[in-house]
Amino acid sequence: MNLQALIEDIRQETLPFYDQGKVADYIPALASVRPRQFGFAIQTLDGRQYACGDADVAFSIQSISKAFMLALTLQADGEELWRHVGKEPSGNPFNSLVQLEYEHGIPRNPFINAGALVVTDRAIGHFGDAHSHLLAWLRAESGNAALSADETIAASEREHGDRNAALAHFMKSYGNLIQPVETVLNQYFHNCSIAMSCRELARAGLFLANHGASPQTGRHYLTRSQAKQVNAVMLTCGTYDAAGEFAYRVGLPVKSGVGGGLLAVIPGKMSIAVWSPQLDARGNSVLGLEALDRFTTATGLSIF
Ligand code: GLU
């Protein structure tokens, strides 16, 4: 199948969905993104890349950073990590506080904000500056040594980060956060603010399609079993409370972010990054979901 022609067709088919969603504005610096943009990039295990649209435009990866942070923390923490954070879908919005109280400060999964804060806390315990550790990894795998956080977005997140601060303090009261709250928040916001293009993101996520080892740098990040775990949590928890709809329509492990990006993994074959900043009511990219649905339907490349 001609993948380049296919993704260009998909782009044309999804453009009519512009303006059905809304750019995230609860982080003011994100609201200034030009809404009508769409990028698609595929990176295959045998070293090919296919891309179209705005695949070279850098965007805020936001919660997609949580998938990479989970991987690097799992690598260091092993099974111990799962004593501090669960692996079940939450059924609640990504920044919800209520469930945490019932569940004694143990977040449901590593992809809701509370869970990502715990993962960041544990990563700091292992690496000190977890953000720099993550950046070094992403730079090596994306092939862009200049990759960095967007300081304007990080500052905007901090300024409007009362809910994340509340989550962090709450978990600290249960003893499930070790580092100072300010340190954890600062690193978390910087991770979310990393700017990457679809091409870079698809390359950086390729290890997840290859049982935890990067075909690009030869580095082994995760065991086969850990790579399976990260993909499974992406499938069940990676797209806020729309994971059921994504499994139904796309059928792949996917992690989304409120910047409008989506990272999808086809184990044994390729990684895909799609980006379009207008979001649906559940916080996922409208065009991104449409595009991935069309891609797996046309190719038959879903895990089901
Ligand atoms: N930095 C965002 C927040 O903490 C991440 C949201 C997201 O992409 O899900 O609110």
Image: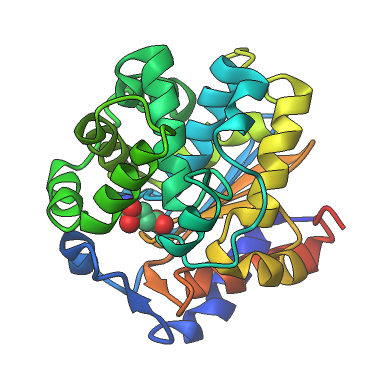
Is 173 placed left or right of 207 in the picture?
left
Residue 223 seen by the camera: yes
Image coords of residue 36 (percent x, y): 34, 74
View quadrant of ligand 1: bottom left
Q: Quadrant of residue 19?
A: bottom left
Taking the spot 62% from the left edge, 12% from the top edge, the residue there is 218
Taking the spot 60% from the left edge, 49% from the top edge, the residue there is 272
Residue placed most toward the observer, 256 or 158 = 158
Image coords of residue 275 (percent x, y): 45, 60
Coloring scheme used: rainbow
Which quarter of the rendering shows the N terminus?
A: bottom right
Residue 216 seen by the camera: no
Taking the spot 14% from the left edge, 53% from the top edge, the residue there is 156
Is 75 placed left or right of 119 in the picture?
right
Vertical comparison of 59 with 131: above or below: below
Give the number of callouts.
Answer: 0
Image coords of residue 195 (percent x, y): 30, 43
Q: Quadrant of residue 145?
A: top left
Residue farthest toward the right in the current orientation of the protein: 304
Is 103 placed left or right of 168 in the picture?
right
Image coords of residue 88 (percent x, y): 67, 52
Which quarter of the rendering shows the C terminus?
A: bottom right
Is 182 placed left or right of 72 in the picture?
left
Residue placed most toward the observer, 91 or 2 = 91
Residue placed most toward the observer, 56 or 203 = 203
Taking the spot 78% from the left edge, 69% from the top edge, the residue there is 297
